[in-house]
């Protein structure tokens, strides 16, 4: 349904602490890079989608004005998408729908963040309204720690096993990041270092958590005719899904996380995927917390509920495993929030077009990209394939 | 804001420390030396002030620095005698767009050195085309308001 | 894929300050629009909302806050920031793709919870330059008005005439915030806000929760006797720094042309039966007349004086009272669209135009001095 749409190019900045540039200069890096890589002229772009976390993060509101020139959007229509942490994938959806609806053939999508200029956890705390929840939730880690406890208790997974599986993910991803030129945190960690690191919010420790990264990602969506005309390698959008739960954190259980399950099923249905672990070649899962990544494997049907730890420890989801997850290092290693979800789509696109360089999964043809947002509230999934 | 129904008040204070990047850092240093710098775009043959790292028209990265004239013409102005959030100083203020000589964009700043009792007195000193010149503070910290204001050239 | 997208129903709050809790207001308009259309929440396809965290009572990640109140629980939804017509067109796109049969376009803004609009618009500035010189939307508008007057001889009286027209039109609008009969002298005598702007020339700060239900063509015809069809849309954004822009030659002509071309309109003044445009500062209505092609450059004041844009004129503008009567900032675009919708369906009550309304134009702007414009055309 809808016209076939492909991602025909993407570019990421180097993510990290970017005090060398202003926010618009950072965005310009990604936008300039995507035009240089693809050879497309900015004049041919028909519209631009931009997005970033809410204004309190960087202290500039309606950033689409601030970036108007660097987005090459002056004189053009724009859309400005924001859905908290899932912004990146929602940006990709906006670009997709703009083309799939027939209203345009070539759309630029840009996500960005410059978190190190502000206090990101304080900003996150303003996601909660002041009447009730704001006093109790100290930024993001608290929420995800509670979710992790809920999940491990529900499925009777011993604490040591959860810890071991999470540690495995932390060690692997931080190591994998050395093969990703854009990644922020690249580190050779030992299990002991991860297990004994400083507690953030129990059971989450320092190396279980994503960094605050500055970065931007630019991506170009094209219709079939335009993709053909331009002759660039195309990653076709095969399926998309998104779902959101209540604003109130205690309202729905988060162990069997319905909106994550629904988002993936919507995408699988559209893409005709019945056995994700078998059929997908690589998955870029949004993993700001190692513990939460385990939960996603289950909610996305990569394994049964309660099984993720065992399979992780077996290496099923490692780069050499049956379904490599986050070979780029994922959100755990780089989290410029407004761009992160888009980075997942960019990485998934690079994989199925054979352009992921040192972290390429050989022969990848079908990939999954995912982002999560809000206080465990939103999940969005996109399936990309090398065939239309 | 006093209301006649139940409310809850919340004040949010968030700190931000902005990376100035090389261009603004150099521009601010120029202000400290009582100089106003712009950058010129070779492709568009235009000079922009404050100095930019890229041309707003053609997006070329800019590296040609120019010390621009501190004199120019008033393009538009507005007057306020009422305090507002972020006001550059105490009321009354006159904020203006000024086309500095030799540049290709308008510079947003303040008009001073005139009677600011009310709009009519301002109008007797300032109108579109009035020539003005930068007046500097003694203590400069690398901030737009190191330039105290622009005053009419007699 | 579907051919056409229809607007089926609309529900909105009045602009006056309400003591109701934010989420209750959102819930009410959501429920009302679904009830009016006879649609159950389960049957609703997608929810696209428009809000702006900065106009949002200090709650970030706006769509998180009102997600379930806005009917989106376990639904595939999304959000546009700052401009409600962006949400409208995104919802249209989603239906055109064929993925969804219906879409709820939800606009969310509670002016009474926010500090001054000028305090909030101050944060559209960059921290290095324009913020340090105190720029906000009213400063930018004042600078623009002065240029307009200097260049084309527009008078304060003509600008005041916009206020007189719109506030009087609003008397027939139960949703408006400010509605009264005023004279040009009243406007001219009001306090100087930012010269040459007087207080009565500047829009208020209003409530504005609005829910609009869209459906694909065949379903729209089932859900309502008189669907109003989406015919065209255009939008365009200007450069960032105020001083880099020509404040009298902005992006509205570009946005309007895109919308007119999409809707097949060649002579807007003739073919459009009612225009609802955003005029947060009275003089801007005159400038937008010119940009929309209703008259030549510099002739906006003359057009107003001729009575052409009055309720029974050739091209009625803002029979709802416009933004001067009610300004929920982010959602004012959807309110313009809603008025066009009601006028086409003959449901505009006291303010229903005498002439037959088949085609309506809805315009919205946000940012400094008309930095971004969006225009939508709808028809019967």
Image (spheres, coloured by chain):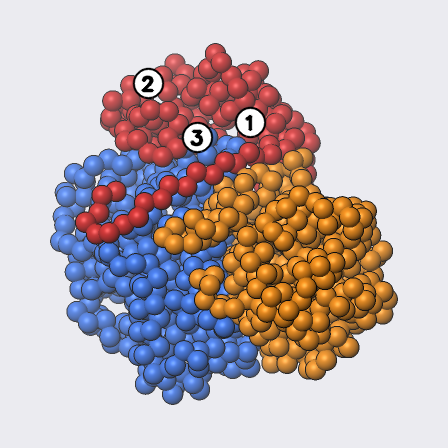
How far apart are labels 1 and 2 at the CA level?
25 Å
Residue that label 1 marks: B102
Q: Chain of mark 3?
A: C
User: Which color is chain B depicted in?
Assistant: red
Labels 1 and 2 touching (C-beta < 8 A): no
Q: Give x and y (percent) for residue C102.
A: 45, 78
Occupied quadrant, residue A275:
bottom right
Q: Which mark is residue C133?
A: 3
Q: Chain of mark 1?
A: B
Q: From the viewer's perspective, is C237 left or right of A174?
A: left
Occupied quadrant, residue B2:
top left
Using the image as rendered, state which of residue A94 and residue C54 is in the foreground.
C54
Q: Give x and y (percent) for residue C17.
A: 24, 54
Using the image as rendered, state which of residue A202 and residue A175 is in the foreground.
A202
Q: Which chain is assigned blue?
A: C
Occupied quadrant, residue C276:
bottom left
Seen at 39% across and 81% down, the residue is C40
Asked if marks 1 and 2 fall on the same chain, the answer is yes
Q: Chain of mark 2?
A: B
Q: Give x and y (percent) for residue A54.
A: 50, 50
Residue that label 2 marks: B114
Label 2 secondary element: loop
Q: From the viewer's perspective, is C274 left or right of A109?
A: left
Mark 1 vs mark 2, foreground winner is 2
User: Which color is chain A depicted in?
Assistant: orange
């Amino acid at each position: 349904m809808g016209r076939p749409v492909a991602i025909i190019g993407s570019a990421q900045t180097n993510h990290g602490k970017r005090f060398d540039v202003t926010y618009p200069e950072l965005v310009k890096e990604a936008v300039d890079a995507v035009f240089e890589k693809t050879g497309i002229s900015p004049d041919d772009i028909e519209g631009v989608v931009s997005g970033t976390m809410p204004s309190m993060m960087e202290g500039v509101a309606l950033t689409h004005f601030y970036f108007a020139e660097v987005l090459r959007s002056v004189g053009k229509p724009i859309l400005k998408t924001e859905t908290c942490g899932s912004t990146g994938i929602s940006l990709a959806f906006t670009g997709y729908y703009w083309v799939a609806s027939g209203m345009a053939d070539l759309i630029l999508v840009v996500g960005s963040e410059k978190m190190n200029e502000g206090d990101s956890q304080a900003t996150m705390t303003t996601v909660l309204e002041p009447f009730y929840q704001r006093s109790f939730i100290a930024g993001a880690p608290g929420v995800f720690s509670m979710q992790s406890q809920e999940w491990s208790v529900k499925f009777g997974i011993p604490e040591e096993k959860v810890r071991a599986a999470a540690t495995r993910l932390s060690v692997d991803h931080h190591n994998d990041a050395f093969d990703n030129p854009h990644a922020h945190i690249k580190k050779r960690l030992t299990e002991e270092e991860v297990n004994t690191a400083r507690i953030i919010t129990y059971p989450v420790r320092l190396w279980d958590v994503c960094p605050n990264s500055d970065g931007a990602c630019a991506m170009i969506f094209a219709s079939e005719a335009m993709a053909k005309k331009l002759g660039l390698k195309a990653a076709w959008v095969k399926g998309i899904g998104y779902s959101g739960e209540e604003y109130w954190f205690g309202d729905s259980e988060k162990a069997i996380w319905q909106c994550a399950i629904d988002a993936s099923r919507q995408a699988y249905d559209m893409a005709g995927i019945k056995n994700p672990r078998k059929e997908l070649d690589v998955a870029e899962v949004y993993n700001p917390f190692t513990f939460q990544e385990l939960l996603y494997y289950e909610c996305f049907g990569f394994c049964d509920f309660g099984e993720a730890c065992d399979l992780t420890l077996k290496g099923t989801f490692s780069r050499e495993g049956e379904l490599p997850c986050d070979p780029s290092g994922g959100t755990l290693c780089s989290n410029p929030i407004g761009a992160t979800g888009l980075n997942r789509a960019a990485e998934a696109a690079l994989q199925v077009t054979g352009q992921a360089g040192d972290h390429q999964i050989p022969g990848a043809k079908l990939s999954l990209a995912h982002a999560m947002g809000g206080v465990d509230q939103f999940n969005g999934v996109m399936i990309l394939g090398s065939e239309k | 804001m006093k209301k006649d129904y139940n409310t809850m008040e919340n004040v949010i204070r968030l700190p931000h420390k902005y990376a100035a990047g090389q261009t603004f850092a150099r521009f601010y240093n120029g202000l400290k030396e009582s100089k106003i710098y712009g950058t010129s775009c070779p492709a568009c043959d235009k000079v922009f002030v404050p100095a930019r790292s890229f041309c707003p028209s053609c997006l070329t990265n800019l590296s040609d620095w120019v010390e621009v004239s501190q004199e120019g013409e008033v393009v538009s102005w507005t007057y306020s005698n009422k305090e507002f959030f972020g006001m550059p100083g105490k009321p009354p203020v006159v904020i203006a767009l000024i086309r500095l000589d030799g540049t290709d964009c308008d510079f947003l700043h303040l008009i001073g050195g005139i009677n600011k009792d009310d709009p009519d007195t301002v109008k007797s000193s300032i109108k579109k085309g009035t020539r003005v010149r930068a007046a500097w503070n003694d203590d400069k910290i690398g901030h737009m308001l190191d330039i105290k204001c622009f005053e009419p050239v007699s | 894929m579907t051919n056409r997208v229809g607007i089926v129903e609309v529900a909105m709050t009045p602009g006056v300050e309400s003591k109701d809790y934010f989420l209750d207001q959102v819930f009410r308009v959501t429920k009302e629009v679904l009830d009016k259309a006879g649609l159950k929440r389960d049957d609703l396809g997608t929810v696209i909302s428009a809000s702006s965290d900065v106009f949002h009572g200090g709650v970030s990640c706006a769509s998180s806050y009102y997600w379930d109140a806005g009917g989106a629980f376990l639904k595939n939804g999304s959000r546009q920031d700052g401009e409600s017509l962006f949400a409208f067109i995104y919802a249209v796109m989603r239906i055109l793709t064929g993925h969804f049969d219906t879409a709820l376009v939800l606009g969310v803004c509670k002016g009474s919870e926010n500090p001054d609009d000028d305090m909030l618009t101050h944060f559209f500035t960059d921290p290095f330059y324009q913020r340090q010189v105190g720029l906000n939307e009213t400063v930018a508008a004042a600078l623009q008005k002065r240029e307009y007057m200097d260049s084309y001889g527009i008078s304060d009286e003509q600008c005041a005439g916009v206020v007189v027209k719109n506030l009087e039109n609003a008397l027939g609008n139960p949703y408006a915030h400010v509605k009264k009969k005023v004279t040009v002298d009243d406007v001219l005598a009001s306090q100087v806000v930012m010269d040459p702007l007087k207080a009565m020339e500047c829009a208020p700060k209003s409530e504005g929760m609005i829910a609009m239900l869209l459906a694909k063509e065949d379903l729209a015809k089932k859900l309502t006797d008189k669907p109003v069809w989406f015919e065209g849309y255009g939008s365009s954004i200007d450069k960032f720094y105020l001083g880099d822009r020509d404040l009298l030659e902005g992006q509205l002509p570009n946005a309007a042309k895109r919308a007119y071309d999409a809707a097949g309109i060649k002579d807007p003044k003739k073919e459009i039966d009612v225009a609802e445009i955003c005029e947060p500062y009275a003089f801007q209505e005159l400038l937008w007349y010119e940009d929309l092609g209703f008259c030549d450059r510099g002739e906006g004041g003359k057009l107003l004086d001729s009575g052409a844009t009055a309720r029974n004129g050739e091209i009625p503008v803002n029979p709802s009272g416009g933004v001067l009567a009610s300004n929920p900032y982010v959602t004012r675009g959807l309110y313009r669209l809603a008025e066009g919708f009601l006028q086409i369906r003959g449901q505009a009550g006291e303010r229903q135009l005498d002439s037959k309304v088949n085609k309506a134009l809805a315009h919205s702007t946000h940012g400094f001095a008309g930095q971004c414009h969006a225009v939508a055309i709808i028809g019967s």
